[in-house]
Image: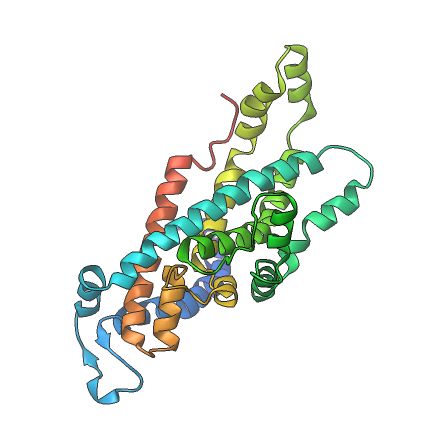
Amino acid sequence: MTVKTAVTHRRALRKTLTPYLLLAPVIIFICCFMFWPIINVFILSMQNHVVTKPKNWGYTGFTHYIKIFTKDAVFTKSIFTTLRWVVVSVAFQCVLGFWLAYVLNKKFALRGISRALALTPWAVAGVMVGIIWKLIMGETYGVFNDLLKRLGIISRNVSWFSNASLATFSVVLANVWRGIPFFTLSFLAALSSIPDDLYESAKIDGASAPRTLFSITLPMIRDTIILTTLLRAIWTFNAVDLIISMTDGGPNRGTTTLALYIMTTFKNKMDYGYASALSVIATLAMMVFAFIYIKWGKLGKEGIN
């Protein structure tokens, strides 16, 4: 091998290894602060580890998982509660967020101020949102009851936290208000990237507004819809601050989602083993959901058919 060939090989090898060397610090960081803790949680999920009972610590195998799927009624109830909480919240946030973005994308006076005001709820902390909406939904002093009475929808004040259905409606309403700005901001960016030529061509061809919406606008922002709904579903699934500040999971665990059940098991009961098993199940469920949703939505294959 000549000197020139050796130098060429070294340069090619350096060029091949450079991306991996640049990624190495990030990969090491992820392994140390993400993968390793996840592995530890899985190991802990197979142990009896109640902090207040150190004498009972030890390996239990899949005992926690068997108990979760066969004997834990709270887990089963929390699954259905979580589904309602996530699906209804994200669906309304997406639809209302798109409608608001569609309006704010038009040119009109004071559009900048309107956009700023529309994004205000996103800047409010979850606990603060819960406190605000708990006051709004209050039975004796709440603005919501007063508004409904003035509109003639109800004749007397409603206790919005008296049963599971009304409490669920209340927390979902608060969460929808909080999450709309995220979709609005995302859809605004996506709508502004659609070429005006497409709309001009559709107008020339005589396409109606609904036809333009479903044939141009929605297909062009499909990737944004898939990604934003996926992210918001994951965030909503893991959100506990708003529920705690409004209902604390009640009444009768009617608003206890899986994430809240994990937190209360970990914090109140100090059962780290059982809480870890619940966490592993929740993590696997979200990973499977994300994979199926991305495959079903064909993320990255955007375009107009």
**Residue under the point 17% across and 67% down:** 62
Taking 196 as reference, is 175 above or below it? Answer: below
Taking 38 as reference, is 272 above or below it? Answer: below
| x and y percentages locating residue 228 in the rendered image | 52, 45
* Along the viewing direction, whichever of 78 and 227 lies nearer the viewer: 78
| x and y percentages locating residue 293 in the rendered image | 39, 41
On the rendered structure, is 42 left or right of 184? left
Residue 297 found in image quarter:
top left
| x and y percentages locating residue 139 in the rendered image | 56, 60
Can you see residue 106? yes
Extreme-bottom residue of the structure: 55
On the rendered structure, is 293 left or right of 300? left
Extreme-right residue of the structure: 109
Picture colour scheme: rainbow
**Residue under the point 78% across and 44% down:** 112
**Residue under the point 41% across and 41% down:** 294
| x and y percentages locating residue 299 in the rendered image | 45, 37
* Along the viewing direction, whichever of 202 and 141 lies nearer the viewer: 141
Taking 113 as reference, is 301 above or below it? Answer: above
> Count the marks: how many?
0
* Along the viewing direction, whichever of 118 and 112 lies nearer the viewer: 118
* Along the viewing direction, whichever of 143 and 233 lies nearer the viewer: 143
Can you see residue 8? no
Extreme-front residue of the structure: 155
**Residue under the point 41% across and 59% down:** 255
